[in-house]
Amino acid sequence: MSNLPALQTPEFASKVQKATLPVILDFSANWCSPCKRLAPILESLAEEWSGKASFFSVDADTNSDLVMQFGVMSLPTLVIFKRGKEVGRMVGLQSREKLIEFVSPHL
């Protein structure tokens, strides 16, 4: 798991659906090796894009309702929301360059 702020199911409406900035959710788990490798990249991007986007970590083991709601089948999965609607999704470990290419158009 990353050091990104954790998002729990009850906070979804206030932190994602009502957000004015784009929101990137990192669906991951403590036992997931690719998730652990992705975490420092996401933490770095969250710092770089502070004020442009919000990043949250969603523990797939403790938030199974969000996992099911968004059809997350593999970890890690990144989902981008804009004005409360999903606008992008990326599955699996990615390079920093691929993540920048994926997120940048939504900032």
Image (cartoon, rainbow, N blue to C red):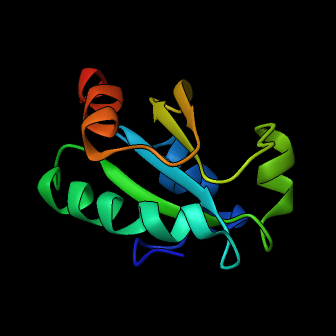
Point 45% across, 66% down: residue: 37
Residue 27 image point, x, y percent: 62, 56
Q: Is residue 73 left or right of residue 52?
A: right
Q: Where 39 falls versus 55 (above or below)?
A: below
Residue 107 image point, x, y percent: 23, 30
Q: Where 16 falls versus 22 (above or below)?
A: below
State which quadrant residue 23 falls in. Answer: top left
Pick whichever, 20 or 67, lies toward us. Answer: 67
Q: Where 55 falls versus 88 (above or below)?
A: below
Point 81% across, 42% down: residue: 73
Q: Quadrant of the N terminus?
A: bottom right
Point 63% across, 63% down: residue: 28
Pick whichever, 74 or 19, lies toward us. Answer: 74
Point 74% across, 64% down: residue: 60
| Total labels drawn | 0
Q: Where 98 falls versus 10 (above or below)?
A: above
Q: Is residue 91 left or right of residue 42?
A: right
Q: Is residue 89 left or right of residue 22?
A: right
Residue 52 image point, x, y percent: 19, 43
Residue 49 image point, x, y percent: 17, 50
Q: Is residue 52 left or right of residue 2?
A: left
Pick whichever, 82 or 47, lies toward us. Answer: 47
